[in-house]
């Protein structure tokens, strides 16, 4: 792992380099190589070449008495450039922590003061332990492999066919479509019950899509049910929205909570409390992929919510100015919601078959 120190004072940079190298020299888990750049522009150029995993970044260029506004924020400007270039954990190492503390997102963006140089190894250790570096590197390699293989095996042999009447944007769309399909195939085996896998934060487009989770100005929650093709083809006159209410307000949740509380007061064993109402709540709400209700688990800004597919209304226009987009349901959860809504609204009731008559007829043949 390469740590890049960007610090314009060579003696301070050398001291930080020694601190980091000595801290990791006996480590069996992390092998660290430390590089130093004493020019902010050269430091960013080195980072952009892709040979740095973690950046230790000074904020101020030069000495305090002669600082211009640009020099005072030189390191922060490099940080903004880093964010545009690629991902890597950044440790601000500065005598002015108050100037960058608003950027802190521990353990991936941290602030260490110049007086606390001995904390640099710990900040690096925390960034590595997050596995963000190895995860992003793996994703980048996988994406590059998928696109390279598709270029050689499909696009190159059939280039004329694919590029006829197509510009570079059209070719890029072909590659992205291929990538999306491969990544979806990879993801099928990795889907878990974790709420973080269900949501995309924030929505990836300013254009609304089915499964977008919105919050109205009155703080109520809504989920878009209009099919994607209507949005894509600009056919949206009205967007169909389903109301979502907090789980704790749902009657079946309250029934389970009341039963659990009553049985707790009666001294009933914990694993047996509220079993009857819990099974009903789980079957009809929490795990339901049919019927009226669809559950959204809490994650970040989203509380536990229950979508009521009978509590819907159409909102004019596709921009929905009175609603703030919070997140989007990822695939296949968005599609599952639309299918559930379609089945619920399009269901047809039929009389139950008389199973006893069927049974008698079948027994007659035995």
Image (cartoon, grey):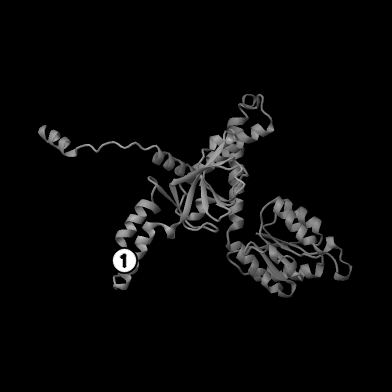
Q: Is residue 25 above or below residue 168?
A: below
- The answer to whether residue 61 of the structure is visible from this angle is yes
Q: Nearer the viewer, residue 281 or 364?
A: 281
Label tally: 1
| 177 displayed left or right of 79 | left
Which quadrant would the N terminus be assigned to in this image?
Answer: bottom right
Dot 1, crowdedness within 10 Å: few (<14), some or many (≥20)?
many
x 70%, y 54%: residue: 83
Q: Quadrant of the C terminus?
A: top left
Q: In this image, 159 relative to 62: left or right?
A: left
Q: Which residue is mark 1?
A: 273
Residue at left offset 66%, top offset 28%: 166
Q: Is residue 366 visible?
A: no
Residue 280 picture quarter = bottom left
Q: Is 81 in front, or is 24?
A: 81
Q: Position of residue 19 (x, y in %)?
A: 70, 71
Q: Quadrant of residue 180?
A: top right
Using the image, determine if residue 358 lies above or below residue 100: above
Give the camera-side residue of 41 and 103.
Answer: 103
Q: Which residue appears farthest toward the bottom when viewing the image?
A: 115
Q: Position of residue 210 (x, y in %)?
A: 52, 42
Q: Is residue 16 left or right of residue 190?
A: right
Residue 151: image x %, image y %? 62, 34
Q: Identify the element where label 1 is drawn.
A: loop
* Residue 293 located left or right of residue 219: left
Q: Position of residue 196 (x, y in %)?
A: 51, 54
Residue situated furthest right in the rendering: 66
Asked where in the image residue 350 lies, by quadrant, the reply is top left
Residue 290 vs 18, above or below: the answer is: above
């Amino acid at each position: 792992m390469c740590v890049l120190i960007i610090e314009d004072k060579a003696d301070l940079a050398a001291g930080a380099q020694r601190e980091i190298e000595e801290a990791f020299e006996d480590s069996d888990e992390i092998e660290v190589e430390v590089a130093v750049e004493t020019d902010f522009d050269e430091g960013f150029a080195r980072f952009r070449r892709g040979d740095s995993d973690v950046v230790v970044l000074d904020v101020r260029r030069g000495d305090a008495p002669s600082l211009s506004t640009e020099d005072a924020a030189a390191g922060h400007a490099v940080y903004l450039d880093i964010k545009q270039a690629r991902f890597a954990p950044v440790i601000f190492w500065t005598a002015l922590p108050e100037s960058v503390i608003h950027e802190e997102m521990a353990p991936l963006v941290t602030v260490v003061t110049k007086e606390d140089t001995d904390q640099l190894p710990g900040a690096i250790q925390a960034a590595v332990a997050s596995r963000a570096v190895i995860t992003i590197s793996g994703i980048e390699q996988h994406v590059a492999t998928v696109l390279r293989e598709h270029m050689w095996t499909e696009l190159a042999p059939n280039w004329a066919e694919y590029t006829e009447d197509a510009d570079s944007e059209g070719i890029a769309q072909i590659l992205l479509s291929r990538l999306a399909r491969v990544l979806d195939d990879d993801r099928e085996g990795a889907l878990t019950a974790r709420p973080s896998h269900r949501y995309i934060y924030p929505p990836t487009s300013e254009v609304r899509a089915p499964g977008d989770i919105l919050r109205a100005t009155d703080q109520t929650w809504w989920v878009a049910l209009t099919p994607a093709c209507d949005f894509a083809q600009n056919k949206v006159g009205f967007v169909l929205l389903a109301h979502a209410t907090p789980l704790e307000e749902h009657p079946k949740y309250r029934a389970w909570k009341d039963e659990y509380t009553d049985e707790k007061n009666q001294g009933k064993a914990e694993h047996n409390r509220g079993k009857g109402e819990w099974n009903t709540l789980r079957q009809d709400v929490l795990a339901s992929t049919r019927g009226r209700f669809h559950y959204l688990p809490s994650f970040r800004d989203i509380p536990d919510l229950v979508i009521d597919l009978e509590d819907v209304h159409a909102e004019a226009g596709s921009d929905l100015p009175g609603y703030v987009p919070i997140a989007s349901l990822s695939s296949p959860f968005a599609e599952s919601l639309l299918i559930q809504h379609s089945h619920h609204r399009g269901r047809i009731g039929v009389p139950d078959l008389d199973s006893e008559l069927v049974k008698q007829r079948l027994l007659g043949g035995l």
